[in-house]
Amino acid sequence: MVIIITELCRARVKNSSETHPLKVWNTDIPFWVVQAYKSIGMFGFGAAVSQLLTDVGKYTIGRLRPHFFDVCKPRMPDGTTCADAINQGRYVTDFVCTSEKSSARMLKEMRLSFPSGHSSFSMYTLIFCAIFLHARMNWRGSKLLKHFFQFLLILLAWYTCLSRISDYKHHWSDVLAGGVLGATVAIVVSNCCTDLFSVARKRTMMAASLPQTRYELSPNHTHGNGN
């Protein structure tokens, strides 16, 4: 929605009625629709990459969630539990879950703490949208409004990350890893896989290719006409 609304507003503010050579059923496609389609496609690609990296971490590490004991209520082969003094300080690998309130899905999810999926997804999507606004919301008089929207997006991502700690679904390190992962993918995809900053790059390259002229004064140069 952020991408579509931004491209639509950009086209209307600039009074652009330009159409793309592409036609669908002999109907001209507005240029802003094509731009939105391309951006949404790359956004989806980045989301898939971020989710894949997150899932690889979850199923490879298999870290237990903070609420593991409440979800599982582990019992050892000898009938003892974690509340018994004999098990204090022991590293236990052989146990069975005895909780009757936990579903099979909950028992599966209790081992998928690292990295936080909500943190990586929220950081990716909202950081990508903030970068998109920075690149495309550049018409006259939109600077303060743009920064306000960017602040709201980043604030929402930050709140989502914190909520995963407060509800005991993740350790703080899980949230940190997920947030860094999502933000990194958003920055890489928006800068390397999209054309959001293509205009700025072209301007930089053109400025660098212009001949530089230097005027140097010789040591014997004088401003006057006399000796």
Image (cartoon, helix red, strand yellow):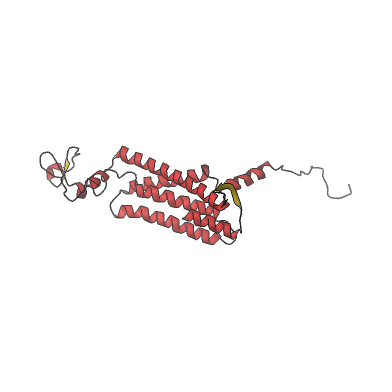
Q: Residue at x 53, y 61 (%)?
A: 144
Residue 14, relative to residue 178: is it above or below?
Answer: below
Q: Is residue 76 left or right of residue 44?
A: left
Task: Tell me residue 40's x, y (percent).
Answer: 48, 48
Q: Residue at x 48, y 44 (%)?
A: 189
Q: Quick one: 217 or 117, which is closer to the camera?
A: 117
Task: Tell me residue 162's x, y (percent).
Answer: 35, 54
Q: Is residue 184 visible?
A: no
Q: Residue at x 45, y 51 (%)?
A: 127
Q: Quick one: 91 or 23, which is closer to the camera?
A: 23
Q: Residue at x 47, y 55 (%)?
A: 2
Q: Is residue 74 left or right of residue 14?
A: left
Q: Quadrant of residue 215?
A: top right
Residue extending farthest to the front is 25
Q: Quick one: 166 or 96, which is closer to the camera?
A: 96
Residue extending farthest to the right is 226
Q: Quick one: 32 or 214, which is closer to the camera?
A: 32
Q: Is residue 11 visible?
A: yes
Q: Is residue 8 left or right of residue 90?
A: right
Task: Tell me residue 178's x, y (percent).
Answer: 37, 46
Task: Tell me residue 219's x, y (percent).
Answer: 79, 42
Q: How many marks?
A: 0
Residue extending farthest to the left is 79
